[in-house]
Amino acid sequence: MGRSPCCEKAHTNKGAWTKEEDDRLIAYIKAHGEGCWRSLPKAAGLLRCGKSCRLRWINYLRPDLKRGNFTEDEDELIIKLHSLLGNKWSLIAGRLPGRTDNEIKNYWNTHIRRKLLNRGIDPTTHCTINEQPQPSQDREFTTTTTSTTITTTTILSFSPLPGSATSTINIKQEDEKIANSTIFDSIVKEEKCPDLNLELQISPPIHLACQESLIKTGSMCFACRLGIQESKDCSCSTSNDIKNSSNNNAGYNFLRLKKSALDFRSLEMK
DNA sequence: AATGTGCCCAACCGCGAAGAG
DNA sequence: GCTCTTCGCGGTTGGGCACAT
């Protein structure tokens, strides 16, 4: 059952990287590009496993990395993203140019956790301490669908951290995996509590025109309710103004994040 | 100056997902 | 559909450093 080791451990260095190793790795990647991590160490003349090389490059040697302290804005952004995404460090890192998932994870554990505790906020649940989150407030994005081929839409209604606008986001999931998301700040509900209040609903996928129709009229057409939007039977999308407004969704700005703040497809770093 | 303690962060480990055959 | 390999992610570890005693 055991996995084969990623490399020949007996002949690999471990621990801190030397300047010479760094130089070799940088030179090799400059010449050949990233990827093929397994074969890279041998080709680059490094006595390291591919995994170690990848980590060293991504977390330390990449030229686009931003070194130095986190700014107050970055702090707040991390907190907001963590309240939405949980410990999805790579996704959070994707929203912070020049920062790595490892760096953010370390920073969270050493600074932000303490900062939130000092504010009286539980860093795990983002609720005020002494207040247990209710089951419906579970932030987990995992969903159950009747078929993995069905694209599901998870609607998260939540009240963000104190001082932030209340918003509703839709996170479209494909094959039970977060693939994309769209945020509407036009739906503003009365804030129920000053802390994070997540309500998770699972429904068939809703395309933008249908969603806006739902917002404007409070109902959806029959096709949409069956999850067959964008078919010729969908009447939501026949309205030009709705269509146009859907296409012009680029202007939304949620949590001061510009367009595609939570577009998970754009979060890929590689 | 020596020792103890706590913090920080680079690096490691194990697991799951994705892809290839 | 199954097995094997590779990659990427998140949790954890431990060495080094700063500060306190």
Image (cartoon, coloured by chain):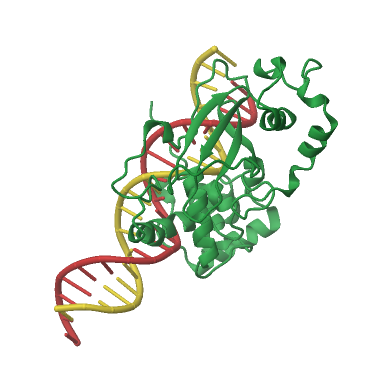
Chain colours: A green, B red, C yellow
Given residues A51 and A270, the one toward you in this image is A270
Given residues C10 and A237, the one toward you in this image is A237
Question: Could you say where residue A258 lies in the image, as x and y percent from the top left?
Answer: 67, 52
Residue in view at x 58 percent, y 45 percent: A39
> In this orientation, does residue A46 appear?
no
Given residues A57 and A127, the one toward you in this image is A127
Q: Quadrant of residue A108?
A: bottom left
> In this orientation, does residue A57 appear?
yes
Question: Could you say where residue A71 lies in the image, as x and y percent from the top left?
Answer: 52, 67
Residue in view at x 81 percent, y 33 percent: A243
Question: Could you say where residue A33 lies in the image, as x and y percent from the top left?
Answer: 68, 53
Would you say A183 lies left or right of A162 here?
Answer: right
Question: Could you say where residue A183 lies in the image, as x and y percent from the top left?
Answer: 64, 41
Would you say A254 lies left or right of A198 here?
Answer: right
Residue at the limit of the structure toward the right, as seen here: A240
Number of marks drawn:
0
Residue in view at x 58 percent, y 66 percent: A66
Quarter of the N terminus of chain A within the rendering: top left
Above or below A83: residue A224: above
Would you say A31 lies left or right of C5 here?
Answer: right
Given residues A181 and A51, the one toward you in this image is A181
